[in-house]
Image (cartoon, rainbow, N blue to C red):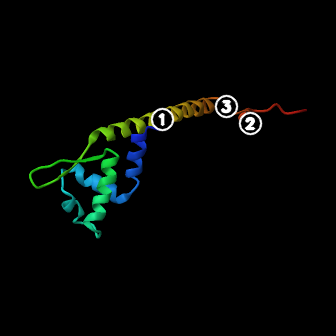
Amino acid sequence: MVDDRLSRAFSALADPTRRDIVARLAGGDATVNELAEPYDVTVQAVSKHIKVLEDAGLVSRTRDAQRRPCHLEGEVFDLMTKWIERYRREAEDRFRRLDAVLEQMEERPAQDDMPREEAS
């Protein structure tokens, strides 16, 4: 069974605008208006993207006087990294086993390469 938090996080990051917002928040907290500046969309549209990121646990908002800065949450990224790392290690193990088989094949001369006795 797939972890629901993991599914929500990967689903949220499937959108390039949301990945860009995450990348910008990696540099520091920002308000929705600050995050919306470079995009040619409304602040409401960016706010909806941030809501998806919040629901996935990737972003949180706090209150700082009149500001409501968005903050990147690292815990879900740790969960995603562990999931990816597990399958990366399994893939590396398969490649190591394949390399070992290929080395054994190179060390053994092929039967076609062995000299044949001529029939007389």
Residue 31: where, in percent of width, then height?
18, 56
Kindly identify the residue that appears in the image at 27 percent across and 67 percent down: 39
**Residue in the foreground of this view, choosing between 115 and 71:** 71
Residue 83: where, in percent of width, then height?
42, 37
- Indicate the secondary structure of the residue bearing disc 2: helix
For residue 76, what is the image quadrant? top left
**Residue in the foreground of this view, choosing between 51 and 29:** 51
Q: CA distance from mark 2 to mark 3?
A: 8 Å
Amino acid on which the number 3 mark rests in the picture:
Pro
Determine which residue is flagged by label 1: 92
Question: Which mark lies nearer to you, 1 or 3?
Answer: 1
Kindly identify the residue that appears in the image at 39 percent across and 41 percent down: 5
For residue 34, what is the image quadrant? bottom left
Question: Alpha-carbon neighbours of circle 3 within 10 Å: few (<14), some, or many (≥20)?
Answer: few
- Indicate the secondary structure of the residue bearing disc 1: helix
Question: Which mark lies nearer to you, 2 or 1?
Answer: 1
Amino acid on which the number 1 mark rests in the picture:
Glu
Residue 45: where, in percent of width, then height?
31, 64
Kindly identify the residue that appears in the image at 28 percent across and 64 percent down: 44
* Circle number at residue 109: 3
Of the residues under marks 1 and 3, which one precedes in the sequence?
A: 1
**Residue in the foreground of this view, choosing between 23 and 36:** 36
Q: Is residue 12 above or below residue 79?
A: below
Question: Alpha-carbon neighbours of circle 2 within 10 Å: few (<14), some, or many (≥20)?
Answer: few
Determine which residue is flagged by label 2: 112
Q: CA distance from mark 2 to mark 1?
A: 32 Å
Amino acid on which the number 2 mark rests in the picture:
Asp
Q: In the figure, is residue 84 to the left or right of 73?
A: right
